[in-house]
């Protein structure tokens, strides 16, 4: 295949050309009306399900576009990439399809399913560092040493162009779209979507969403340039990027894309809602857009709202922890410490009050050795399944009304 002529700024026509290139390579992912959110948002909500894309995320769009446009001599030397998992899988799959050897650097704590999938697509995986930024340093060094082409996860015009094809599908699938809400890491996907909408549907609002503990864009946009930021802990590893890319940053700054942040609690609640009511499994970063819609003032986002579910590659162990966290955040899971008298029948009386309050007991643990207790007291730790925040408050009130000391 002849090399694609270089571009200096992504245009709508470039993205349409990429869409033709990707025809038959990617999946045209479905959209799904999400009525469970529409009432709370004050507008119709429609999910764009990129979690159902090949390799489990939107990343194959940009990766294949980038790799397929490389000159033949570059393809022969191979490629190198760095990723927490989704870009890794996208590059590995694209390289496999195009017959290119790929080395992918991933953080040492990358999830087991993402590691297995990347290797399964034929890439050589090397684990280094604690973040994508550190893995990217190693990938750059490998590219300089070996002559391989670095396939950046977001900071390249071809990558932004490929990711922008998501917006073309949204415009066709949701003609009345008014707002597109997109998880934001380095910025490739948001930049691609914003580019398309600025030309094809300038009335549509684009909102980028970052994890508040790993949000480099707000400070960078305020400074007028990409500013490195130390990353805090976040479950959303897919959007935990310390420095915005130059290419996507220019697009977001030029087009005035709004950036919002969401908390870990908001993301876990969103992930739980999407799983429970939307019947979609997504990773925490993939639920960031839904979290931002839930956190927004009802009616503040114009038109039909389309959150993009960017990825579904979640480690089952992380899914278990996030669901538990989400249950607590949603008032579906209550943990209590109750002090009772150390005499026969006290525990049974406590559990009877809990049962009458309509809570299901998940776990009971009691101890006599806590230093805050007198010799005639027992501390009971209760884990209860509840029906929401109001029910949690009602359970506590009934226990206190029955004379129990609740902490």
Image (cartoon, rainbow, N blue to C red):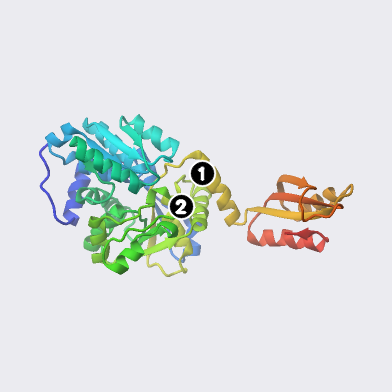
Q: Position of residue 10 (x, y in %)?
A: 18, 55
Is residue 44 something one can see in this rendering?
Answer: no
Disc number placed over residue 319 in the picture, else none? 1
Is residue 335 something one can see in this rendering?
Answer: yes
Total marks placed = 2
Disc number placed over residue 234 in the picture, else none? 2
User: Looking at the image, which residue is at 20% across and 51% down?
Assistant: 157
Q: Position of residue 215 (x, y in %)?
A: 39, 59
Query: Could you say which quadrant of the image residue 27 lies in?
Result: top left
Q: Secondary structure at mark 2?
A: loop
Q: Position of residue 161 (x, y in %)?
A: 22, 51
Left or right, 159 with respect to 109, comes to left
Q: Secondary structure at mark 1?
A: helix
Crowd tier of the residue under label 2, counting other residues whose Cα lies within 10 Å: few below 14, some 14–19, many 20 or above = some
Nearer to us in this view, 198 or 313:
313
Left or right, 298 with respect to 218, comes to right
């Amino acid at each position: 295949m002849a090399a694609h002529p270089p571009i200096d700024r992504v245009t709508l026509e470039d993205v349409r050309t990429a869409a033709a290139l990707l025809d038959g390579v990617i999946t045209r992912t479905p959209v799904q009306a999400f009525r469970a959110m529409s009432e709370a948002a004050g507008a119709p909500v429609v999910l764009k399900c990129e979690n159902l894309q090949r390799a489990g995320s939107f990343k194959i769009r940009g990766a294949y576009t980038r790799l397929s446009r490389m000159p033949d001599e570059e393809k022969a030397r191979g490629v190198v990439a760095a990723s927490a998992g989704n870009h890794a899988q996208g590059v590995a799959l694209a390289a496999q399809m195009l017959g290119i050897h790929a080395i992918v650097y991933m953080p040492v704590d990358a999830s087991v399913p993402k590691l297995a999938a990347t290797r399964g697509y034929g890439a050589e995986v090397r684990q280094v560092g604690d973040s994508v930024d550190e893995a990217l340093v190693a990938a750059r060094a490998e590219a300089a040493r070996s002559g391989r082409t670095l396939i950046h996860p977001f900071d390249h015009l071809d990558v932004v162009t490929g990711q922008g094809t998501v917006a073309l599908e949204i415009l066709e699938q949701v003609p009345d779209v008014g707002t597109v809400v997109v998880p934001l890491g380095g910025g490739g996907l948001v930049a691609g979507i914003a580019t398309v909408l600025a030309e094809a549907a300038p009335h549509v609002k684009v909102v980028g969403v970052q994890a508040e503990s790993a949000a480099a864009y707000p400070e960078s946009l305020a400074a007028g340039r990409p500013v490195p930021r130390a990353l805090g802990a976040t479950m959303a590893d897919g959007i935990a990027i310390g420095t915005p890319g130059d290419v996507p940053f220019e697009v977001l700054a030029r087009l005035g894309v709004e950036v919002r942040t969401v908390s870990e609690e908001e993301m876990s609640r969103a992930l739980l809602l999407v799983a429970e009511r939307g019947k979609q499994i997504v990773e925490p970063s993939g639920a960031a857009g839904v979290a931002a819609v839930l956190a927004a003032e009802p009616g503040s986002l114009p038109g039909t709202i389309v959150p993009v579910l960017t990825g579904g590659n979640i480690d089952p162990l992380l899914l278990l922890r996030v669901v538990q966290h989400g249950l607590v955040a949603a008032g579906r899971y209550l943990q209590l410490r109750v002090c009772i008298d150390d005499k026969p029948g006290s525990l049974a009386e406590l559990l009877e009050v809990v049962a009458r309050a309509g809570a299901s007991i998940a776990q009971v643990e009691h101890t006599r050795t806590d230093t805050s207790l007198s010799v005639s007291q027992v501390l009971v730790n209760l884990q209860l399944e509840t029906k929401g925040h109001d029910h949690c408050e009602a359970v506590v009130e009934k226990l206190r009304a029955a004379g129990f000391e609740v902490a």
